Amino acid sequence: MVKHLVMWNFKEDFPEEKKEEMAKEADARLKALVGQIKGLTFAEMKRNRLPGSSHDLLLVSDLETAEDLEGYQVHPLHVALANEVIKPATCNRACFDYEY
C-alpha cells in the first residue's frame, strides 16, 4: 500500500468566503474517484482548523501500489480535479508518499 499526502495553502487572493466550498467540492470529487481510478482505495480532503499548522488543506489517499500512484497522478479524472478545483485556489504544494 502507498500513502499519498499532499498539503497546500490557499492563495492570498482566494476569497475567504469560498474556502469552505472549495474544500467540500474537492473532498466530494476525490471520494468519487475511489473505484474509478485503478488502485485508489481511499481519498479525502481536510481543511485545517487548528492553529500551528503550516498548511491549509490536506489530501490523504491510499493506493495499492507505487505503480497505481503513478497512474493516479496522470489519470484524466484526477488531472481535471486538480486543474478545475485545487490549482486555482492553492499554492505552496508539499507532497509526501510512502509505502506501508
Image (cartoon, rainbow, N blue to C red):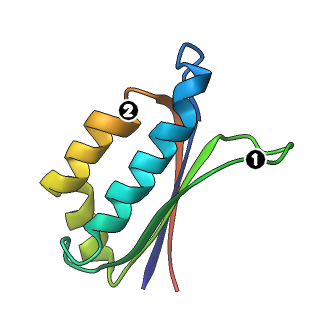
User: Which amino acid type corresponds to the residue marked 1 in the rendered image?
Assistant: Arg
Q: Residue at x 57, y 29 (%)?
A: 10
The N terminus is located in which quarter? bottom left
x%, y% of residue 12?
60, 16
**Which of pointers 2 and 1 indicates the residue nearer the eye?**
1
Q: Which circle marks residue 96 in the picture?
A: none
Look at the picture and state if 87 lies above or below 56. Answer: above
Residue behind mark 2: 87
User: Which amino acid type corresponds to the residue marked 2 in the rendered image?
Assistant: Lys
Q: Residues within 10 Å of mark 1 (few under 14, many from 20)?
A: few
Q: Quadrant of residue 8 in the image?
A: top right
Look at the picture and state if 25 lies above or below 10. Answer: below
Look at the picture and state if 69 lies above or below 25. Answer: below
In this rendering, would 64 be left or right of 53?
left
> Which element carries disc 2, helix, strand or loop?
loop
Look at the picture and state if 12 lies above or below 99. Answer: above
